[in-house]
Amino acid sequence: MEPRTRRSYEALRLKHIGRIFGRMVRLRAYGGMLLMVAVSAATLADGAPWRRIWLPVQVVLALSFFFFELRRYEREGLTERSIAGNLMVGIVLEQSLTWGTGGLASPLLPLVLPLAFVGAAVLPPRQRLALMGAELGLLSLLSAAHVFGWTPPLHLSFLGEPSRETLIAVAVFILLLVVAANIVGAAIRGTFEDMLAESFHQRDELFATHRAHARTLESLSGEIAHELKNPLATVKGLTQLMRREPGRAQPQERLEVLAGEVTRMQDILEEFLNFSRPLVPLSVSEVDLGALCDEALVLHEGLAAEHGVRLARGGEGQVVAVCDPRKVKQVVMNLLHNAIDASPRGGQVVVDVESGSVGDVRVVIRDSGAGLSPEVSARAFDAGVTTKSKGSGLGLTVARALARQHGGEVTLRNEASGGCVAELMLPRELPADTLGPVRDVREVVHAR
């Protein structure tokens, strides 16, 4: 974890621990007053002279400490050192009050358990072990003093004296409960820290993705500006030429060049916008992929004729998938366009629609070009990478993003007999998470 992230992590962890500790301090201060009233009543009811001296002193010390710690917490906040000291003094006071109100037969004996749990939940390992050692040591001393009669009779007279066997059973039981409370508290603290660390890890990954995407957008902005310069210069030159000849009919070829350059700029900007904006939610329905591919082929007949490339359709008849037809059609058309561009004059592009063996469907597009070079193959889906003289390098990036939004994938590979194979894989049924909140293009593009 980076130093800056570590500092943020520690600050957030201490903040949440402070909330738990603050509630404990307030409850102990105001609930302690009621407890001290009960202790005072037990002292008066018992009548043992030593208890009438010992317990009032403990009551004053305990209440003074409780309210002093509350005021200090409200004024200064929290540090882990203050937690350890506070809990250690609290354990000593609790054991002292327990000794004065009956030892192992005291009604205050179970109060050691919430203190043990809170200490294990909020303290780091070394301080947690020290506090548990103090708890077990003081309890063992109290148990020995009561069982072996090292002190005057500890039991409250109005509650009666328990048998030695009962005292031994209580001592063993409370020691085991203290160990269990520490184990549970440590487990909860570990779970909390794991969740917090995981959330920071995910945040760091998201920040890294955003930084990478921002760098990509920054570099692409320069490339887009460069790509737009040439068509803008052409449009500007032709419009100036046409303005100087207002009375003459403009040649058809000039108008076609103007329309082509405007379309080219529109395509560049549309691809850039598709990459830079979030993916919109899917609008799914049952789609016949064969019919969808037939539509894409019809729309590309003109481009194929211009390149002298034949288009062919193979594969199965009707293959149905649940998907967003508009987005899947965009992916197929992008892959088909690339295949036509890559094929030489006289070549052929074949589109196959297949049912996979693991519950998926595939659209496979084979061209008859030279295939992908190793350099381009490794980075084909990175934004800005293109082999076209007038390409933006965003088509494949967006195509893969759209496929992954469906829970599918787009891959490229070279065929042994020559040419490149572009494959779109889609699940027959959309995974549940694809119908949830919208995912950003950046998450999809960089989730590799």
Image (cartoon, rainbow, N blue to C red):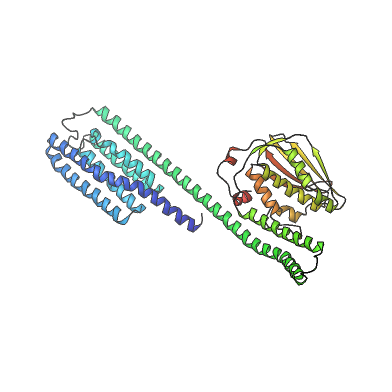
Q: Nearer the viewer, residue 257 or 448?
A: 257
Query: Which residue is found at the position 36% from the left and 52% from the top?
Result: 80
Residue 315, quarter of picture: top right
Q: Nearer the viewer, residue 175 or 420?
A: 420
Instruction: Point out residue 342 in the picture as x, y percentages from the top left corner.
Output: 80, 53
In the rendered image of this protein, does residue 430 appear above or below residue 348? above
Query: Which residue is found at the position 48% from the left and 56% from the top?
Result: 5
Question: Which residue, as the protein is rendered here, is positioned at the far right?
Answer: 346
Q: Is residue 53 left or right of residue 197?
A: left
Residue 209, quarter of picture: bottom right
Q: Nearer the viewer, residue 81 or 218?
A: 218
Q: Is residue 26 left or right of residue 326?
A: left
Question: Which residue, as the protein is rendered here, is positioned at the far front?
Answer: 247
Q: Nearer the viewer, residue 342 or 273?
A: 273
In the rendered image of this protein, does residue 13 appear above or below residue 317? below
Instruction: Point out residue 366 in the picture as x, y percentages from the top left corner.
Output: 80, 45
Tally of marks = 0
Residue 363, quarter of picture: top right
Instruction: Point out residue 397 in the picture as x, y percentages from the top left corner.
Output: 67, 52
Q: Is residue 2 left or right of residue 362?
A: left
Query: Which residue is found at the position 73% from the left and 45% from the top?
Result: 332
> Can I make out residue 364 in this image?
yes
Instruction: Point out residue 233 in the picture as x, y percentages from the top left corner.
Output: 73, 68
Query: Which residue is found at the position 30% from the left and 29% from the top?
Result: 169
> Can I make out residue 147 in this image?
no
Q: Is residue 95 left or right of residue 414?
A: left
Question: Which residue, as the protein is rendered here, is positioned at the far bottom?
Answer: 244
